[in-house]
Amino acid sequence: MTPFLIALQFLTTFPIQLKAMPSPQQNGQSLLFYPVVGLLIGAILWAIAILFQSLPIILLTSIVLCTWIWLTGGLHLDGLADTADAWVGGFGDQARTLAIMKDPNCGPIGVLSLVMICLLKWSAIYVLLQEKMLLALLIFPVLGRIAPLILFLTTPYVRKNGLGSALAEFIPQKTAVLLIVVCLSFPLVFSWLGLVSSFVFLLSLYYLRHKFIQRIAGITGDTVGASIEILETATLLCFVILSFYF
């Protein structure tokens, strides 16, 4: 259970305390449980939407989004803000971009990126609740958390002495690939709408990976966190827009 507890401790605000320092192998295996943690987050959001569905939709949407952020401790939003600041302030230079990412201060571009992503996600959740597509709340947190698995499998980690280097080295690759395929099939419960959403997820991830390699020759913890937020929002937004056509 240690790899699962590592993933739960890292990705959520649940009060998890490990009895011993995890090994590099256990840290690598913990990536396999990121989608499981995503499913747990989604189950909590789905339960809230079910239990409080008698509330006005505008209020319930805010509750769901705030719970979503609270459950993750804003970890991925922090990565998004740092990445946005670095991408604009780095002026295309790798060293400058990486240096800005390490700066704990949040600049105006970072703040703007948070406002935009939260506004788009809030709007998408509102439509989900309005159209009674509550099952989608289970799926998209899972999709978002297979992004780190794919990125660590396929992309160099820039900071050689960082935690991400050890994670990438000890991922059980065959199990990871099988898990990715299974998770990508989850949206198929929505038929063609789900299939297109999975395709949009992969296309968006490919684009982000390309930009990360182009700018900093790989990934960092901040870019991985940013990817989770961007992909969750992009696929969720695509899903609700296409739901009016499928």
Image (cartoon, rainbow, N blue to C red):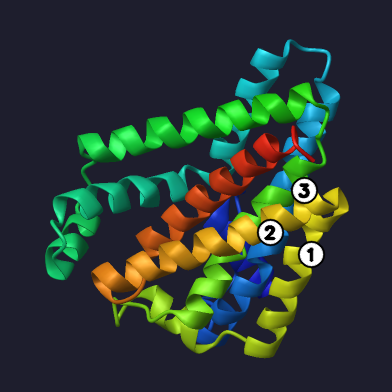
Q: Position of residue 211 (x, y in %)?
A: 34, 65
Q: Are marks 1 and 2 in contact (CB under 8 Å)?
A: yes
Residue closest to the far front: 245
At a point 39% along the width and 30% down the height, the residue shown is 115
Q: Residue at x 24, y 54 (%)?
A: 87
Q: Earlier in the sequence, mark 3 or mark 1?
A: 1
The residue carrying pointer 2 sits among few (fewer than 14), some (14 to 19) or many (20 or more) residues within 10 Å by Cα, namely: many
Left or right: 183, with 72 as reference point: right
Q: Which residue is mark 3?
A: 193
* Label number found at residue 185: 1
Q: CA distance from mark 1 to mark 2?
A: 8 Å
Residue type at mark 3 is: Leu
Q: Is residue 45 visible?
A: yes
User: What amino acid is found at the position of numbered circle 2 in the picture?
Assistant: Ser
Q: Nearer the viewer, residue 165 or 203?
A: 203
Identify the image quadrant of the C terminus: top right
* Residue 215 sits above or below residue 120 on the image: below
Of the numbered discs 1 and 2, the one sitting upstream in the chain is 1
In the image, is residue 230 above or below residue 121?
A: below
Q: Amino acid at mark 1?
A: Ser
Question: Which quadrant of the rendered structure holds the N terminus?
Answer: bottom right
Q: Residue at position x 85%, y 52% from top?
A: 191
Q: Determine whether the residue tagged by mark 1 lies in a helix, strand or loop.
A: helix
- Residue at left 68%, top 52%? 197
Q: Residues within 10 Å of mark 3 (few under 14, many from 20)?
A: many
For mark 3, give the secondary structure.
helix
Q: Badge 1: how crowded within 10 Å, few (<14), some, or many (20+)? A: some
Q: Which residue is mark 2?
A: 198
